[in-house]
Amino acid sequence: MLDKLSAATVRHRRVVLTLGLLLVVINAVIPGSASTVGQRLLILISLAGLVLAVVVTRVRPAYLVVQPQVPAFATPGPAWTVFFAVGYLGPASMHIGAMVRATRQGTLSTFDVVIDVLWVVLAALVVTWAWRGHGVRLHPSGVRQTWALGTLTVPWEALLAPQIPPAADRRQWLPMRITEPRLIRRRGIPRGRAALRTDIVDAGFLAAVIGHYVAHPEHRAAIGGQAEYERLRAALPGHPAGGSAAGPRAPYGTKTW
């Protein structure tokens, strides 16, 4: 159930966020008692969003999103960031509504402006973070990790196959085994270590995929295509169409968005 909810939220995250923003705008502009009803509704939605954000952090899907237009295979955007953004929009809307009403009444102070603007800026950052779905992308040229403040790109030539962690391993990061540090490219504010996020994807699955392309450079040029992804699935351990047994892991799935 959680897997389906998480996948649906990621797939339609922009629709969910747009509806949340629409509620914020409506609540900010409507007057009087209607605004009170809107605030209560937003508080309930926010609480539900924050609870779901905590719950779905345990979901680690074992599939990649096919992006032929890039081209790339990408980890699905984390569902918990969408729920967190929805949860944050409630308090942000209350501050925006209060600022609008205080402006109409001529009682808006400088302190109120500073606080309310900070809430709006933070809300914009949180929504942008959830909207873009930052994560890990596999390109024909290498592996790229993006986050709100920068990117880390490692060419295939600079990588060794990562160690595949046990199925029960709930690690947040998958260390990359770098052979040529000089080939790494960083943009924006760099992270402290060369590791990939695995709070948004099954760590063993991601390690297996990277290891496959490290070992088979002849397939890298086809990354980003649906046919290549089907071939990759069949070649990975644990897939019913091919590969060797890999313990209790579930077969790796597929998504094309």
Image (tube, rainbow, N blue to C red):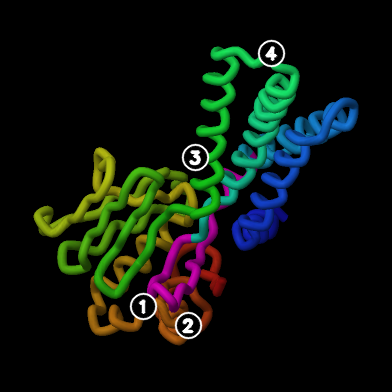
Is the residue marked by circle 1 packed among few (<14), some (14-19), or many (20+) residues within 10 Å? many
Which is closer to the viewer, label 1 or label 3? 3
Which residue is identified by label 2? 226
Which residue is identified by label 1? 223
Q: CA distance from mark 1 to mark 3?
A: 31 Å
Q: State whether residue 131 is above or below residue 62.
A: above
The quadrant in which residue 88 appears is top right
Q: CA distance from mark 1 to mark 4?
A: 58 Å
Residue 38 locus on image (x, y percent) = 82, 34
Q: Secondary structure at mark 2?
A: helix
Q: Which kind of residue does numbered mark 3 sit on?
A: Leu
Q: Secondary structure at mark 4?
A: loop
Which residue does the image show at 44% across and 65% down from the upper left?
74
Q: State whether residue 91 is above or below residue 144.
A: above
Q: Which kind of residue does numbered mark 1 sit on?
A: Ile
Indicate which disc, 1 or 4, sits on the residue closer to the N terminus. Answer: 4
User: On residue 125, which mark appears?
Assistant: 3
Q: Is residue 164 left or right of residue 11?
A: left
Q: Is residue 135 left or right of residue 26?
A: left
Q: Is residue 156 left or right of residue 147?
A: left
The quadrant in which residue 177 appears is bottom left
Which is closer to the viewer, label 1 or label 4? 4
